[in-house]
Amino acid sequence: MNTQTQRPKPTRRAFTLIELLIVIAIIALLVGILLPSLGKAREAARMMVCKSSARQLAVGQLTYGNDWKDYFAGVNTSGMGGQVDNGVGYLGDTRSDMPTTTYDWISPTMGDVARMSTNRAWRSKEIFERYGCAATKFEQVHWGGAGDLSDFVSMIQQVGIKQVSYLSPAAFHMYPNATQAARFRPIGPNGLPLSIIPRFGFTTPVSVVSTYAPRFDKVGTQLSNKVLVADGTRFLTSQQVLDFDITPNPQWYSSFTDPGPIFRGSQAYGRGGDGAPNNHKLSFRHPSEKMNVVYFDGHAGDMGVAQARRDATPWYPSNSIFTGGQSSEESQAFHTAGQVLP
């Protein structure tokens, strides 16, 4: 009679504490390796989304120019009515393509197609959020005053508002001097020019060519070298308070334009601007401190801090003269006083 010896069942050995710690350490190491890559991928994706938004705005300007005999939207074109009535016609509920301020070039170009709100306060929110950069992080307060202030206060209390994302170089929107601006005074109901002088710029750090007007055919000999819109965030004070300007007819720049990186005192880009030295970090907000730019021919690219502050060519019309006053250190080393910009 064969009998089978019954073998004992094997017992499962538990992890020792040391082995468990080793596994945890390996997992932590893998996470540490993967997280930076995931973070970089997320930042790169945000930069691409931001670039796409900026390019949509540029296409809106190009379309506007086709409809308005090469003039593009801005303070001295679509914003001229606000200069005449001091922005009263902008207040409250109007139209989706009505400028929110005289400097607002986004509502006239995108308001109808995007079906923006007819209310000025809520349209401002849509501009900063629907066409805002994916990398923006901070909410703002309002600055300035207006007859529809209560609309802005109510909107901010209900849902808040994000920071300004994009700015257009002001030199392309203003006339070069008072004489040239006077030539384009608006016409009154009697058929005679009004006394209002449209907005004109400065002679430093660049003196814009005297025949310039805010038209695509006046921008330059090579539109692919001239910046139409760039990442940029407005600062209010050295206390680093972010704001957006609700004044319907502000004197300078508003929340839609900026003198640009060549001007040392630029709030968005300059070393001498309000909010320095942290102001530029919110404008050059993408990896390696770069910002997205879209040119007048519609193509998009990016710029680092040094490049943006060095060459004045992208920020001013062709045949303008670099004077050097109040300019960035990088541009002073790159240009000579009296140099004509291509």
Image (cartoon, helix red, strand yellow):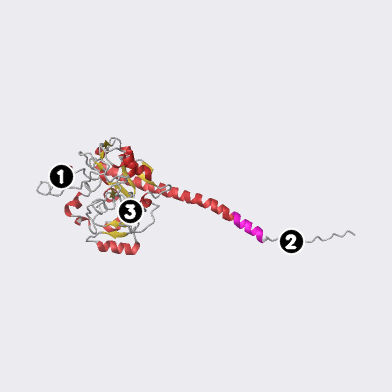
Q: Secondary structure at mark 2?
A: loop
Residue on which disc 3 sits: 164
At horizontal 60% and vertical 57% (from top left) the residue drawn is 24
Question: Residue 73 in the image: x percent, y percent?
Answer: 25, 46
2 or 3: tag closer to the N-terminus: 2
Residue flagged by tag 2: what amino acid is it? Thr
Residue on which disc 1 sits: 182
Quick check: 339 above or below 233?
above
Judged left or right of residue 280, residue 192 is left
Residue flagged by tag 3: what amino acid is it? Val
Residue flagged by tag 1: what amino acid is it? Ala
Question: Residue 222 in the image: x percent, y percent?
Answer: 30, 35
The residues bearing labels 3 and 1 have C-alpha atoms spaced at a distance of 31 Å
Quarter of the image for the C terminus: give it: top left
- Asked if the residue under mark 1 is in contact with the one under mark 2, i.e. CB atoms within 8 Å, the reply is no
At horizontal 27% and vertical 62% (from top left) the residue drawn is 151
User: Is residue 25 on the magenta stretch?
Assistant: yes
Quarter of the figure with residue 159: bottom left
Question: Residue 44 in the image: x percent, y percent?
Answer: 44, 47
